[in-house]
Image (tube, helix red, strand yellow):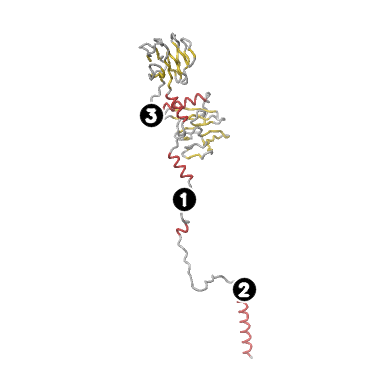
Amino acid sequence: MPITILVRSTQGAESRLTFDGTQRVVLGRGAGCDVRLPDPSVSQRHATLRAQGADFLLVDEASTNGTFVGGVRIAPRTSRIVRSGDVARLGRVAIELRIDQNAITRDVAAATRDLALALVASALDAAGADPTLRVSVVEGADQGADLPLSQEGRPYVTGRGAECDLPLADADASREHAAVVRRGALVFVRDLRAKNGTWLADQRLPPGQEVPWRATQMVRVGRTVLALREPIGEALARIEQAPDEPMPEVAASAASETAPTPAPPFPAAAASAPAPVVAVQSGAPARPRRGWSPLDLLVMATAVAVLALSLAGLVWLLRD
């Protein structure tokens, strides 16, 4: 049975990934996880979801801030059965689990990256930061200049001309040297048949042809070097590489659960009960009182028998 994991951003946007129910699903902050949750309170490998017969088990992988279902923490390296509709919390991030017949997510790697980027974009937006992709001049006379790619599908032109979206004070640049366009999360660069060409990394671009531009590559226009800045991708990379951020309330709760209760200076019973009173006599110590032993009973029986015989003899003599 397929299982769907729903994640809601701080802005209420909902993203979902559906797995076939037979594979183990790794949830965490690391780039290699099946479900990437970019929050410092989530461990690199926080929890796993796996099938066991008709049930699904959620396992905490010794995370820093714990895995909770229904407000109750799962012990580290321990599993708990989860049902459709259960809400689990990993650090500060809540996810909902649904067991249904949704279509299985095919390209999980791309889908989980899109999910992570959407969560980071939501967080940046909530913090008032601008998540827009932009082109920055990192080398040349215009170093520090910046061009936001705000409109999707619009070609932004850079060159020596004053009418360009990113004008350059570079004598080796053509008046309209290259165009940059954003389509979704992808950016493309196109050489506008510039005299000195447009270079992506160490490759000269074919004139008039759009080529994908990755954030790890530089573009050279004349003597000017351009970099593609992805605030969302850069924030995601920083979050994924950061150490776990311990949550104070979780640490305090864990400490109260695991710390031993200090022993009182005296046993509680001795402290509350009155001390026994002991009578002390001078001279020989008092012998403890005890019950009748068999020997004592035998001696008494013999004495009674002797006394009875004596009385019988006395009565016989008096009759004579």
Q: Amino acid at mark 2?
A: Leu
Residue position for label 2: 295
Give whichever of 237, 145 is nearer the camera.
145
* Residue 153 versus residue 92 in the image, above or below: above
Give the Cα distance between marks 2 and 1.
54 Å
Kindly identify which numbered label has been placed on residue 88: none
Q: Does the CB distance between marks 2 and 1 fall below 8 Å? A: no
Q: Amino acid at mark 1?
A: Pro
Query: Is label 3 in a helix, a strand or a loop?
Result: loop
Q: How many marks?
A: 3
Q: Amino acid at mark 3?
A: Ala
Quarter of the view holding residue 167: top left
Q: Nearer the viewer, mark 2 or mark 3?
A: 3
Q: Residue furthest left?
A: 162
At 46% from the left edge and 55% from the top edge, which residue is drawn? 265
Circle nearer the N terminus (3, 1): 3
Density class for disc 1 (Cα within 10 Å; few <14, some 14-19, many ≥20) is: few
Quarter of the view holding residue 219: top left
Residue position for label 3: 127
Query: Is label 1 in a helix, a strand or a loop?
Result: loop
Give whichever of 45, 243 is nearer the camera.
243
At 62% from the left edge and 84% from the top edge, which residue is drawn? 310
* Image coordinates for residue 98, horizontal then vertical, percent: 50, 31
Give whichever of 165, 100 is nearer the camera.
165
Q: Does the CB distance between marks 2 and 3 fall below 8 Å? A: no
Specify whether 168 is left or right of 62: left
At 51% from the left edge and 25% from the top edge, which residue is drawn? 109
Residue position for label 1: 262
Circle nearer the N terminus (2, 1): 1
